[in-house]
Every structure is written in C-alpha cells, then in structure tokens.
Image (spheres, rainbow, N blue to C red):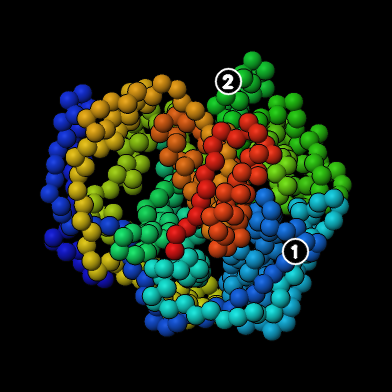
Amino acid sequence: MESINDEIHFLPNPKINPAKLDYIKEDAKNVYANLFEIQLTKDLKLYQYPYSVIPDIGYGDGDMRIRNILFKVCSKQIKEIYGECFISGDSLYSMKKIEEKQIINNKIALKKLIKDKTEYFLEIQKYAKQKTIKQEHINNSPLAKQFIELLIKDILHANPKLEFYKGLFVLKKEKKTIKTQNADINFYPGLTTSFMETTKGNYLNVTLKNKIIQNNTILDFLKERKYFDSKNHESIAKDLIGRSFKVSYSKRNYKIFDILFNRNPNNQTFNYEGGSVKLIDYYQNIKKIKIRDEEQPIIAVKVKGPQDEYKMLYFIPELCFLAGLEDKEVKDKNLMKQLSTYTKLEPNVRIEKTNRFLDLLIDEEKEGKNKLSAKEKSEKYGIKVFPVKEYFKAYNMEEPILIGENNNIIGNNKFFRVIKKANMISWLCFYEKHNYYDADNLYKTLNKASKSFGLKIYEPEWIEMPNNSSPKDWTDTADDYIGKNKNKYTFCYIFNWTK
C-alpha cells in the first residue's frame, strides 16, 4: 500500500468569534480525502430485462415504491436466477443473459403487497438489449455508478472477516465489549461506502462509522426503572419512545413507537398468514425462541406499508437491545474515556483505518469451498480500487455560514435572525423515472440537514415523470396536480438531473 505523501496537510479548525466575525484565512493546501478511484480492467456487460407487475399498477404516484418493495421481498428468488442485479425505472439489470421470460411468485412474501385481495406477481421478460459499462462511463452514467456500487458491496460480502449491519461493515475481530460499573455495551467500529460526485469525477467515499448496542436488554431497562409501578410509565415512555433498537435474531434496526404496559406476550396477538396468533406462540413455534418472562410489556413499532397505510409490529423486550448510549452512560467518565480510545483517533490512524478498506477487497479467505473470495470476485468483475492520484485543494472559508444562538444564521458579515421556523409538511417532489434514487437521496439529505435548524422535513408526495420529459410536461403536470389539491401544498420541488 502506498504511504501518505509528506505534502498532505490537515487543516486546523478555524478559530471563529461570531461576535466579531473575526475569521482566519488559510492558503490553499493539499489535503487528504477519504476518496478512492475505481478502475475497470475490463468492460462490464449488463443485460437489460423489461419487467412488469401483474396485475398492472402503472407508474403513478407511489407505484414505483410498490415496485421496489415487490423487488425487495422477492429478491432471493430473483438472485437465484439473475445473480447480483438491480432495478432502475421499468428494467432489471444483470450480468447474466437469460433467454426466457420469468414469473416470480413468492406467495408468503407477496402477502405484504395485497391490494383489493389481489396477489401481485413479477413478470420479467427475456433480455431486451446488452449494455456495456466502460471506464469512462463511471463519471457520466448513473447506471454505471449504481452497478459498480452494487458489485463492490458484493465483493465485501464475500469477505468472511466482515459482518454487515445495513450499510455498515465491521471487522468481526474488532468488535469490543466495554463494561464499567454503570454500563455494558458492544462497540462496533466499521466503515461505510458510497459514491461521491466531485468536480473531478465520481469517487468511492469510504467513511469510518461506529455503532453502539447495549448488552442489557430493554427488559433489563424496564425492570431497573420499575415498570410494574404505573407511576413510572410516563417517564419510561418518554425515555424510550423514538429510540432505535435491534432484536437478537436480526440485524435490522427499528424505532420504538410506544410501550404497551397493559399488554404482554400472552395477550398480544397479530395477524400471521391469515390468522390471529399470540406473540408468545409465534416466537416459540415459528422462531423457536422460548420467552422467559410472560408478563413483560410489549414494544410497538409503527411502519408504513406499500399503499401508504400504517400498521403495527410488536416486539418482546427481552429480545431487544437499545442502540446508542443512555444519559447515565454519557456521564460515566470511565466509559467515555474507554470509548474515546476507539472514536477519537489521530489523523494518521484514521487514514490507516480507512485505507485498509483496500485490503478487504483483495482478501483471499473464503467462506466455503464453492464460494469465491473477495479477491476472486474483484478479479471476476475486473474492479480495482486505489487512493486518489491527485490531491485535493482546501481552504478555510473567509466568511462561513454558521448557526448561532437561537438558530440565527451568521454570514457575509451579517446576522440573519430566524423569526419563524416552518416545517415542510405538505410538499411535492417531481423527478424523472431514472432519477428515482437521486430523488430519494435529496429527501434524506434535506431531512438530515434541517435538523441543525430545528426543522422537520416530512416525506413528500412523489410524482414520477417519464424520462426525457419536456419542460412543458413538467409545468403542465405541476399545474394540474396542484390545481386539484388547492391549498394543500406549502412547497413544491421539481427534481431533474442534468446530464
């Protein structure tokens, strides 16, 4: 692995005095960026398969989300036929050439998509055309970027040294259990990957990211807070509602919507395969998990269904573990000191941990005799990853935009007082079919950035436009839609990617 060049610098944090607007200027310097170049040693051949839903659901508002959910619940069956693949618009893309039409029907999974008592099926046609992804396409083709990102994740999944939590991958041997008098937590130091578009092109961004999961169950938390005394219910609910948690039998995260103190595993039922079943029976008969405490309350989670309807999921506290730290743990100096040895890393250590990502892609260890190693998959796909050859220039901003007290905005030698904050509750997002993922990223970015200002961005109503729509198509659709829903929308954003 190449060493870091001596000419690279780490800029100090600017010393800013908002009262005097006294900012420090810095000359441009070469700085390290956690970005990596992608090189294709051979052209990648993709096959395009038009697909449809039976019965037809069209491409109207919300329909693409149903299609994506349908693809997700049937993904295991689809991958058995097409291998690593993804959908974009009304097509499926794969590196396999399949000559015959395929009907995908997972009856159990498709019960999630029942509409008017009609069961959905996926009909995938024979390949329509072949597309070739070359090196030069990485910087100007969303399709190329999407597929290469999928292949890199597939390479990482072949590495038995790693385990995955959604987009986070963690070296198994580096998981830590940290115990003090007041805490017992599991610490997962990991990495995430994503493509980042810069003025110099698209690069793979590799970021250090950590995850903390409590070792004690939520039932332990409830007992500690004496949940059996109704006087404590309000304070317990206040501390738990909105918190993330994971369950012992899955790596998926959920958010607590409510604590049902008047319910327990013996009297809480839910619909399963067309019938009503008790939680305790479901876990013992289906999950093969014996519930020890039959009197504990129930955790309720509210999730959104494919038809924008809401439904409740129910979980048993003794099988659940809270994510993040408790207030008492944040105040635990011993715990925070131990954690800081893993989180507050010197720049050169952060670089070393980030760059070892390269070794994970060429690891030769296999999960089994018939499995490919990460290195073999990298060679199969013809993908090489290496640090950027060209350094990035960075400057300290002479006039940064800051969020001051009471969320006032400071910039350009002026103070801008925020008089009234307005949450984005009812708004529209227009996007072309091939920009589905970009539109989704826009919403997620807005939602994340708005928190600094104390604002909340609710999910918009999505309106998908055909690819290559004319400006008049956009304006006519917007006028027609808003005209039929007068006074409903406070904000409208039209999203279109300029190629």
Image point (44%, 63%), residue name:
499
Q: Which residue is more in the foreground, 326 or 492?
A: 492
- Measured from the top left, where is residue 30 in percent x and y? 18, 57
Residue 337 disc label: none
In the image, is 439 to the left or to the right of 378? Answer: right
Tag 1: amino acid? Val
Up-down relation of residue 490 to residue 496 (above or below): above
Q: Can residue 370 be seen in the rendering of this structure? A: no
Up-down relation of residue 33 to residue 289 (above or below): below
In the image, is 377 to the left or to the right of 69? Answer: left
Dot 1: element: strand
Residue beneath label 1, please? 53
Image point (82%, 58%), residue name:
119
Dot 2: element: helix
Residue beneath label 2, please? 235
- The image quadrant that residue 425 belongs to is top right
Quarter of the picture containing the N terminus is bottom left
Image point (24%, 49%), residue name:
346
Mark 1 and mark 2 in contact (Cβ < 8 Å)? no
Q: Can residue 478 be seen in the rendering of this structure? A: yes
